[in-house]
Amino acid sequence: MNAASAARLTPGSVGIVTPRRIAIDAPLALDCGRTLPRHELMVETYGTLNTARSNAVLICHALSGDHHAAGLHAADDRKPGWWDNCIGPGKPIDTERFYVVALNNLGGCKGSTGPNTVDPETGSPYGPDFPLLTVRDWVRSQALLADHLGIARWAAIVGGSLGGMQVMQWAIDLPERVANAIVIASAPQLSAQNIAFNEIARQAILSDPDFHGGRFYDRGVLPSRGLMLARMIGHITYLSDAAMRAKFGNDLRAPTPSFNFDVEFEVESYLRHQGQAFVDRFDANTYLLMTKALDYFDPARDYGDRLDAAFRRAQARFLVIAFSSDWRFSPARSREIVKALVDAGRDVSYALIDSQLGHDDFLMPIPQYHDVLRGYLSRAADELEARP
């Protein structure tokens, strides 16, 4: 192992991890009316499951996340998992005390059954034939995964953004299986503005000539332009105006304007880089599917549009965290969740973290944020370990 790799593994790294694909052979009925007879989920685990099988923590990922939340897959990896700063020995989600499970959701593009995997009935990738999913479908799939792992009740379920929506759905739909629900930088449903951003991103993909109705796999092409534009649109909503101003301002890359439509401003260069990097690692059909799941999420819909009525089903204790600079899922949206939980008589703690970056702050190692998470989960671990 070279010095750079060793540095990425310390301090508090879970080390080299190996993902595994778990087959779920039970049928899964979906909200769209279809049923998957079986599916597979790509999973990573960190830490050790205790003998009572009571110390398991589920990590629910956001739109572009996956199962690789911590550690490295090989010593020469360029960077660790997407939440490595938060998961590991001595970190806020402490793998010396918890058994942490991270998965790539059904419909994802990193090894779980989804649009880019083979449909056993046709021998070709599912593509656009893969069913649209809801957050509730993901919870059902994750519950089947928990059954497979022998986990009857999660010590905690943790998620940011779209991951936080999954946490709320778990607490409502399967209340007896969640002890602590940690909802980070999330919302009780999307605003019209957020749905509009998602629709523009989807149209960028759908209108790409290389999309071919979602069957681009068979053509040996990628809808690169559309997916790149979709990511660029999304990315600007994840960053605050102050962060973009501080990082880029309106700086030109050259001393004077070039008077053309090539990249001239630093922020243009940054967005094109982010867009191209996304094309290299993500699937266009999965992006469409994930954004629709975001749009559909509204747990109050089945309870007379009363979020407090939905939360009356919950038994978990809640921690809700918001970030001051997040305008995509603003602190006001987190306070809606908190108010509904209070009105429902649930046990809830709330923290507003002073931040600068924007929505992506939920991924950052902000000391105040980590202190809140560490303190809450440490108390949960203390309670587990005090039981006979």
Image: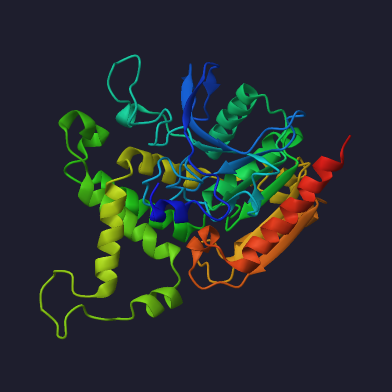
- The colour scheme of the drawn protein is rainbow
Q: Quadrant of residue 54?
A: top right
Quarter holding the C terminus is top right
Residue 306 can be seen, yes or no: no
Query: Which residue is at 17% across, 38% downward?
Result: 221
How far from the left and from the top, in percent, is residue 242? 45, 77
How far from the left and from the top, in percent, is residue 112? 43, 30
197 vs 37, nearest the viewer: 37
Q: How many circles with numbers are drawn on the protein? A: 0
Q: Quadrant of residue 85?
A: bottom right
Q: Is residue 347 above or below residue 313?
A: below
Query: Which residue is at 52% across, 51% downward?
Result: 84
Left or right: 68 with respect to 275? Answer: right
| Furthest residue in direction top, as rendered | 121
Query: Which residue is at 43% across, 42% downward?
Result: 290
How far from the left and from the top, in percent, is residue 155? 72, 40
Left or right: 280 with respect to 103? Answer: left
Q: Is residue 194 above or below residue 256?
A: above
| Furthest residue in direction bottom, as rendered | 255
Query: Which residue is at 48% across, 28% downward?
Result: 20
Left or right: 2 with respect to 316? Answer: left
Q: Quadrant of residue 287?
A: top left
Left or right: 313 with respect to 165? Answer: right
How far from the left and from the top, in percent, is residue 174? 70, 33
91 vs 247, nearest the viewer: 91
Residue 98 can be seen, yes or no: yes
| Furthest residue in direction right, as rendered | 388
342 vs 317, nearest the viewer: 317
